[in-house]
């Protein structure tokens, strides 16, 4: 669940930032029981391409639009857990970095769709069969 709090930024001014309790699904986002169960387990991460990245995954948190960030997004396209990664990022409200090949700005737009009632399964293109295959 996200909430707003005021935080100091580098130039001495303050602004509202979103803060969430880590590991808590975003309030208002819906998913099938099978997908929600899959997302509660974190084991899929060991199959991620970024897990073995030589830079320790730094490219996935490089500035948006940089060469490193674009390379990370390309790597996500061939990642065997791309969809569960994207679903997880949307489910838990990951605000920073590349997840499932998407930028934070792209996920903001997806989250808006989810909060308007679109299901997470539909948005990321999951079916129960795929969920079962991914967990095999
Ligand atoms: S989709 Fe991208 S961010 Fe997600 S696990 Fe795979 S390589 Fe990492």
Image (tube, rainbow, N blue to C red):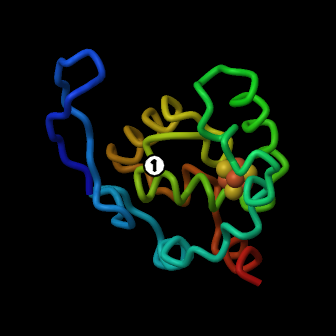
Residue drawn at (67%, 71%) of the image: 44
Residue found at x 43% / y 42%: 95
In the displayed orientation, state which residue is furthest to the bottom: 136
Residue 81 relative to residue 4: left or right = right
Seen from the viewer's position, the closer of residues 88 and 67 is 67
Given residues 29 and 72, the one toward you in this image is: 72
Above or below, 67 against 56 in this view is above
Q: Quadrant of the N terminus?
A: bottom left
Q: In which quarter of the image is residue 97?
A: top right
> Residue 38, image x and y in percent?
56, 76
Q: In this view, does 37 lie above or below 27?
A: below
Quadrant (top left/top right/bottom left/bottom right) for the C terminus: bottom right
Comparing 3 with 52, the one in front is 52
Residue found 63% across the figure and 62% down from its top: 84
Specify whether 66 is left or right of 78. Answer: left
Asked where in the image residue 60 lies, by quadrant, the reply is top right
Check disc 1: other Cα within 10 Å, few if <14, some if 14-19, many if 20+.
some
Asked whether 31 or 106 is in front, the reply is 106
Task: Tell me if 106 is positioned left or right of 114 in this view.
Answer: right
The reply, left or right, for residue 96 in relation to residue 23 is right
Q: What element carries label 1?
A: loop
Residue 67: image quadrant is top right
Position of residue 53 measured from the top left corner of the image (x, y, whole percent): 79, 51
Position in image of residue 102 (x %, y %): 61, 38
Q: Is residue 46 above or below residue 97?
A: below
Residue that numbered label 1 is attached to: 94
């Amino acid at each position: 669940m996200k909430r707003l709090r005021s935080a100091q930024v580098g130039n001495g001014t303050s602004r509202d930032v979103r803060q969430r309790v880590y590991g808590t699904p975003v309030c208002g986002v819906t998913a099938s029981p099978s997908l929600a169960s899959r997302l509660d387990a974190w084991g899929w991460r060991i199959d991620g391409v970024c897990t073995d990245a030589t830079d320790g995954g730094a490219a996935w948190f490089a500035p948006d639009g940089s060469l490193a960030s674009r390379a990370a997004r390309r790597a996500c396209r061939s990642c065997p857990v791309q969809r569960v990664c994207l679903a997880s990022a949307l489910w838990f409200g990951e605000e920073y970095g590349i997840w499932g090949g998407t930028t934070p700005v792209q996920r903001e737009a997806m989250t808006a769709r989810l909060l308007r009632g679109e299901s997470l399964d539909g948005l990321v293109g999951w079916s129960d069969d795929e969920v079962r295959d991914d967990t095999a």
